[in-house]
Amino acid sequence: DAGVTQSPTHLIKTRGQHVTLRCSPISGHKSVSWYQQVLGQGPQFIFQYYEKEERGRGNFPDRFSARQFPNYSSELNVNALLLGDSALYLCASSLGVGNEQFFGPGTRLTVL
Amino acid sequence: GESVGLHLPTLSVQEGDNSIINCAYSNSASDYFIWYKQESGKGPQFIIDIRSNMDKRQGQRVTVLLNKTVKHLSLQIAATQPGDSAVYFCAEKTHFSGGYNKLIFGAGTRLAVHP
């Protein structure tokens, strides 16, 4: 079975632009979580979604938003990009909100 | 506030030696901890976990020790191999009202295995 997939692999944007990152969970998984990993640091929690509803949000500004679709895939949107948004964005899927999370390879976002 | 940190940013070992990676956590209410391995260009990969009602858990070549008194975790890798070279993170699972949980990660330790 395929693991968690994310697209695109790499992305370059300029300050002020917006970006949409996509995630497809493992088949049968209904929960998706998003993490931001700045170079040299551990991942930081952004959102958790379950059954298309936001179940948790980390300490990120309102420029960050997400949604989950009926097929359980998810999008992370970031508006008004800042240089500091440059990071690896990781998606993790799990059967439910309390189950083991399986991570995708991430999307490397560079903001110039 | 909540934090999970690591004592050593880098660790260099000889192939065949045992490796020990340490981690401190600050939330004494945490009841579940996980070690992840992250190779270059990949997402974190689950290695082993431990619940707070345990002191030790063993896997294949890996052992996790939990000392709740001093809020300390360690990951021991036996007979370290070149394929073990990666960044290792400890993570703490925190539960919130509404049924969701998040993982709080430390900064990571880079393990470099030399032949």
Image (cartoon, rainbow, N blue to C red):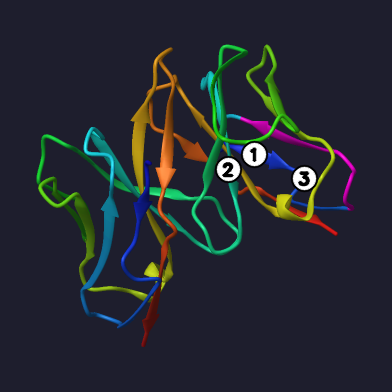
Subunit of mark 1? Answer: A
Position of residue A29 in the picture relative to residue A107 (left or right): left
Circles 2, 1 touching at the beta carbon (< 8 Å): yes
Q: Residue furthest bottom?
A: B115
Residue A44's disc is none
Determine whether A112 is above or below B67 in the image.
Answer: below
Number of disc labels: 3
Dot 1 amino acid type:
Thr
Q: Residue at x 45, y 22 (%)?
A: A95
* Quarter assignment of residue B23: bottom left
Q: Which residues are magenta?
A: A14-24
For disc 2, the marked residue is: A104
Say if the magenta span includes residue A65: no
Instruction: Indicate the quadrant where residue B18 lies.
Output: bottom left
Separation of residues labelled 3 and 1 (CA atoms)? 9 Å
Q: Measuring 34% from the left and 61% from the top, which residue is drawn there?
A: B6
Q: Which residue is mark 3?
A: A8
Tell me the residue that label 1 is attached to. A5
Residue at mark 3: chain:
A
